[in-house]
Image (cartoon, rainbow, N blue to C red):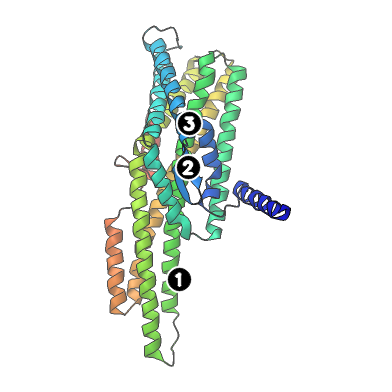
Amino acid sequence: MLSLLTTFQGSVKCKVWKKLRLFHATDFQSLMYPCFTFCSVLGIFPYKINGSTFETSKQRYILSTVVLCVLCIYELIVLYEIDITQTIKFKGVPKTLERNCFYILGNFIAIVTYILNGSRMHLLQNIMNVSSNLPLDSYQKLSKLIHIKDIIGFSYLIWEMVFYYSTLDFDTWHKAFVPYLNFLIFQTDMLYMNCVCILKACFKRIDDNLMNLREHVVNDQPHLLRRVYHEQRNSLLLKELKALKKQHLAISDTVHKLNMIFSLQLLATIVLTFAELTFELYFYIMHWKIGMLMNNVSHPIYDFLLAVSMTYYTIKIVLIVWACDTGKDQATKIGITVHELLNDITDEQIQDELQLFSLQILHRENAFSAKGLIVDATLLTAVSGRLFIS
């Protein structure tokens, strides 16, 4: 009995250690573990994972509801004090507009995140299912990006919070809720980016399998029993193509759900990011030209804060756009590979299956978007040009 208990405890510790190992993910749960942990701490992850199934946690859902209610009350009080009673005053109208933009969009993201909790749980379940076919080395590569990004970003926000507390003269309310809003916006953005990266890896897996099929067809050697051999080979190729087409359809449906669920949050993030960059660039120019300060800090610290904040927003939006743009390119590459394979195949059944696969790809535009706004490199080009002109 004692030996069985010891074995059970050892297996539990082994599973926990496996789940906690950073940069060495072996499945979807271990890959997303840091992100899910940070979201749970913030009260925006009202789920629990039972084996390979997401379930709603009653305790976490209550916590999420309480956190949102307190946050909404705080936001209403702050906006009332800024815009109505003007008990909270900033140096200049631009700073007042910047704070209004931050509070309104930040609270909007929090509300949308809460409302879509159920839909997001089903989305995460779908991503877990479609990513179950990924090989171990794909999880290893993804974990290096996702874990480093999540940990460094969260650590930076903690450092920023401590630095602001020790440097700036904030009211108690602001000391509690402004950092929380920053954490919440960051984690929802990283959750979206992580989902995009996983779906991109799924598209790459399909393309790699198609390339392997093409190499098998091109490098095929003559066989003594040529007719029987080719019939068996073509039958296997046909089954493999049907399986890949089914996987592609499932991944494409997941991309569509991702766009629907994260559209409002992503659009608010884009607007907030470029609004903050515009305002902070304006503050920096005004300080450089006429020495105007928007906060009660010394000149070197003020320049440092603006530079760090602009760097943070720039890096975050660049990473999101990079993930979406490369994900769309990876999905498009599958269509090219299908046409290359179609040119190398002579069997009519396989050609028909490839034609159907090609039509499926054409009808499923796997672009990551937010309410019709395609998130790719052209977005950064357009906005950076607008910032430069302004």
Q: Select label 2 or label 3 by which is in front.
A: 3
Q: Measured from the top left, where is residue 277 in percent x and y?
A: 44, 29
- Whether label 1 touches label 2, CB < 8 Å: no
Q: Which residue is mark 1?
A: 212
Q: Is residue 285 above or below residue 19?
A: above
Q: Are marks 2 and 3 in contact (CB under 8 Å)?
A: no
Q: Tell me the amino acid under the disc marked 1.
A: Asn
Out of 77 and 284, give the one closest to the viewer: 77
- Judged left or right of residue 280, residue 116 is left
CB-based contact (under 8 Å), mark 1 and mark 3 = no
Give me the residue at 42% from left, 27% from top.
Answer: 106
Residue found at the far front of this picture: 1
Element type where label 2 sits in the image: helix
Q: Earlier in the sequence, mark 1 or mark 3?
A: 3
Q: Position of residue 221 (x, y in %)?
A: 45, 85
Distance from Cα at disc 1 to Cα at disc 2: 30 Å
Q: Residues within 10 Å of mark 1 (few under 14, many from 20)?
A: few
Specify the label residue 335 is tagged with: none
How packed is label 3: few (under 14 Cα within 10 Å), some, or many (20 or more)? Answer: many
| Residue at 42% over, 78% down | 218
- The reply to whether residue 251 is in sight is yes
For disc 3, the marked residue is 184
